[in-house]
Image (tube, helix red, strand yellow):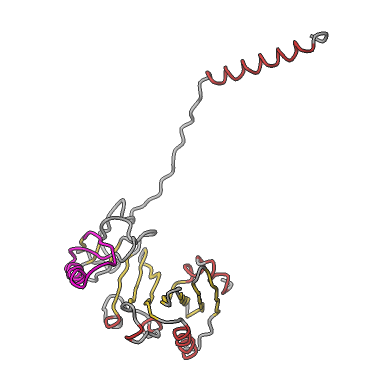
C-alpha cells in the first residue's frame, strides 16, 4: 500500500461509500416525545364559558358579521339584529377567535376576542356613565372629545376583563383634520388633573404618531394619536394595569417600569 499510493485512495473511497450505504439501510430508532399540554379551561375554542365576569349564566352565541361597506338601510338592519342578539358586529376586520362569540344577555359583555380570553363591552358616549355593569373611571369618561362636526364615527368606550381582572378601560374615536387640536386638548386635560406625561413623537410611512404615558394611581394612562396621510386622526386613550403597562415595551422604556 505504501509503494502504491493510489490504492490507498481507492480503499478510502470504497470504505466511505460502504458507510453511507449502511446508514441509509440502518433502522432509525424513533424516541416518542410527550407534548405537555396547557389547561385551557377558560379558552373559548375548548370550552365555552358558563358565566360572565359578573356571574350571569344566561349566555347566547350569535354569529359574527364583519364589514364597513353598508348602506344606511343595511346598517340599520345590522344594528337591529345586534340589539336582538341575532348577530354580533365585529367591525371592519377580524378581532374574534371564531365565527361566533358568547354574549351575556344581562350585562351585554362579549367573550371571544383574539389572544387571551377576554370579556369586552363597548359603550356609547351617552351610556358611558350610566351603565350599571361597566362603571368606567372618571379619567376615561371625561376624556376630551371631538366636536360633532369633527367626528368621522361615534365615540366608543370599552371595558375589558380577563380572568376576572379589569385589564383595560378606554375611549377611542376618529376625527377629521390634523392632530394638533386633539393634542392641545389632551395637554390641557392632563394639566387640569396634575398629570405630567412622558411624550414621544415619531413619523413613519406618511403617519405622524404622538404618545403620552403617565402613572395614574396604581394604573397607567396611555394616549395614542395617529394622523393619517389623508388628514384623518385616530385617538386611543387607555387606562391599564401595571402588568399590561410593563408588557408594552415602548411604554415600559419611557416610564422606566
As rendered, which of 201 and 41 lies closer to the eye? 201
As rendered, which of 184 and 36 lies closer to the eye? 184
Tell me what residue is drawn at x 49 percent, y 30 percent: 31
Q: Is residue 130 magenta?
A: no
Tell me what residue is drawn at x 27 percent, y 81 percent: 127
Q: Is residue 81 magenta?
A: yes
Is residue 112 rendered to the left or right of residue 79? right
Is residue 39 rendered to the left or right of residue 86? right
As rendered, which of 99 and 141 lies closer to the eye? 99
Q: Quadrant of residue 13?
A: top right
Is residue 4 rendered to the left or right of residue 253? right
Q: Residue 95: image x %, image y %?
A: 34, 62
**For the C terminus, which image quadrant?**
bottom right
Q: Residue 21: image x %, image y %?
A: 57, 17
Residue at the farthest right position: 3
Is residue 216 rendered to the left or right of residue 118? right
Do we see residue 123 in this rendering? yes
Q: Residue 196: image x %, image y %?
A: 54, 84
Tell me what residue is drawn at x 28 percent, y 75 percent: 133
Do we see residue 219 in this rendering? no
Q: Which residues are magenta?
A: 61-89
Q: Residue 162: image x %, image y %?
A: 37, 65
Q: Quadrant of residue 113?
A: bottom left
As rendered, which of 130 and 232 lies closer to the eye? 232
Number of disc labels: 0
Amino acid at each position: 500500500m505504501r509503494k502504491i499510493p493510489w490504492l490507498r485512495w481507492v480503499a478510502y473511497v470504497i470504505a466511505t461509500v460502504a458507510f453511507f450505504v449502511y446508514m441509509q439501510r440502518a433502522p432509525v430508532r424513533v424516541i416518542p416525545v410527550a407534548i405537555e399540554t396547557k389547561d385551557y379551561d377558560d379558552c373559548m375554542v375548548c370550552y365555552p364559558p358558563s358565566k360572565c365576569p359578573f356571574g350571569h349564566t344566561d349566555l347566547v352565541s350569535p354569529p359574527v358579521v364583519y364589514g364597513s361597506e353598508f348602506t344606511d338601510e343595511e346598517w340599520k338592519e345590522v344594528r337591529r339584529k345586534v340589539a336582538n342578539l341575532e348577530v354580533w358586529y365585529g367591525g371592519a376586520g377580524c378581532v374574534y377567535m371564531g365565527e361566533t362569540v358568547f354574549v351575556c344577555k344581562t350585562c351585554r359583555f362579549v367573550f371571544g376576542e383574539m389572544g387571551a380570553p377576554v370579556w369586552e363591552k363597548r359603550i356609547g358616549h351617552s351610556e358611558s356613565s350610566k351603565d350599571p355593569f361597566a362603571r368606567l373611571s372618571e379619567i376615561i369618561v371625561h376624556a376630551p372629545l371631538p366636536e360633532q362636526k369633527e367626528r368621522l364615527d361615534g365615540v366608543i368606550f370599552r371595558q375589558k376583563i380577563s380572568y376576572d381582572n379589569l385589564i383595560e378601560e378606554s375611549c377611542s374615536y376618529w376625527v377629521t383634520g390634523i392632530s394638533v387640536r386633539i393634542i392641545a386638548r389632551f395637554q390641557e386635560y392632563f394639566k387640569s388633573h396634575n398629570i405630567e406625561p412622558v411624550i414621544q413623537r415619531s413619523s413613519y410611512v406618511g403617519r405622524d404618531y404622538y404618545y403620552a404615558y403617565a402613572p395614574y394611581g396604581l394604573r397607567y394612562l396611555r394616549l395614542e394619536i395617529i394622523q393619517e396621510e389623508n388628514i384623518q386622526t385616530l385617538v386611543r386613550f387607555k387606562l391599564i394595569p401595571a402588568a399590561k403597562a410593563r408588557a408594552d415595551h415602548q411604554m415600559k422604556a419611557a416610564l422606566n417600569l
